[in-house]
Image (cartoon, rainbow, N blue to C red):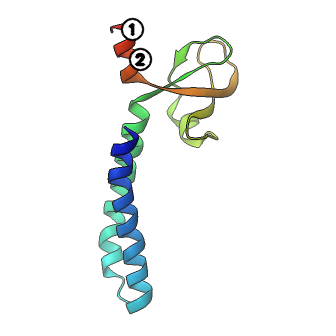
Amino acid sequence: MYKTLLAIGIPAGIAEIGTIAWWIATGDWRPFAIVLPIAVMIAALLTRTYRKRTAYVCPHCRKVFVPATTEWFFAKHTPTTRKVTCTECGEKDWCAEVSIERLAAKTGS
């Protein structure tokens, strides 16, 4: 999943930064105006895809859960953990990220 996110996200970021550089160098803002909405859409789709494919393991009760969208989006995080509230025990802590797809394959669901 990370490779796919990077393969799509990096070119979108380069296009956005490139059009900003073009705007600064030439004064022509139109390429940036075209690329910006596309880059925002790509970022939104990548975020949605990432959100749909991840769950978290509570370090206290070991339950696998999916936090509320707003909490998930604004939570402090590292590449492999996120500080969210467990839906089972109610503890807010750094929870390890797990792939929902791998979890389903492991449990046979």
Q: Amino acid at mark 2?
A: Leu
Q: Tell me how far mark 2 sits from mark 1, CA to CA.
A: 6 Å
Question: Where in the figure is residue 48, as x and y percent of width and height?
Answer: 39, 40
Q: Quadrant of residue 67?
A: top right
Q: Residue at x 39, y 50 (%)?
A: 6
Q: Are circles 2 and 1 on residues that touch, CB within 8 Å?
A: yes
Q: Amino acid at mark 1?
A: Thr
Q: Which residue is the site of mark 1?
A: 107
- Residue 103 got which mark? 2
Which residue is more in the foreground, 43 or 104? Answer: 104
Which residue is more in the foreground, 82 or 32? Answer: 82
Residue furthest to the bottom in view is 26
Question: Where in the figure is residue 42, as x and y percent of width and height?
Answer: 34, 53
Q: Secondary structure at mark 1?
A: helix
Q: Residue at x 42, y 71 (%)?
A: 17
Q: Within 10 Å of the Cα at label 1, are there few (<14), some (14-19), or many (20+) other Cα atoms? A: few
Determine whether, in the image, residue 89 is placed left or right of residue 109.
Answer: right
Q: Residue at x 31, y 81 (%)?
A: 30
Q: Secondary structure at mark 2?
A: helix
Question: Where in the figure is residue 2, as x and y percent of width and height?
Answer: 40, 41
Determine whether, in the image, residue 97 is placed left or right of residue 106.
Answer: right
Q: Quadrant of residue 94?
A: top right
* Image quadrant occupied by the N terminus: top left
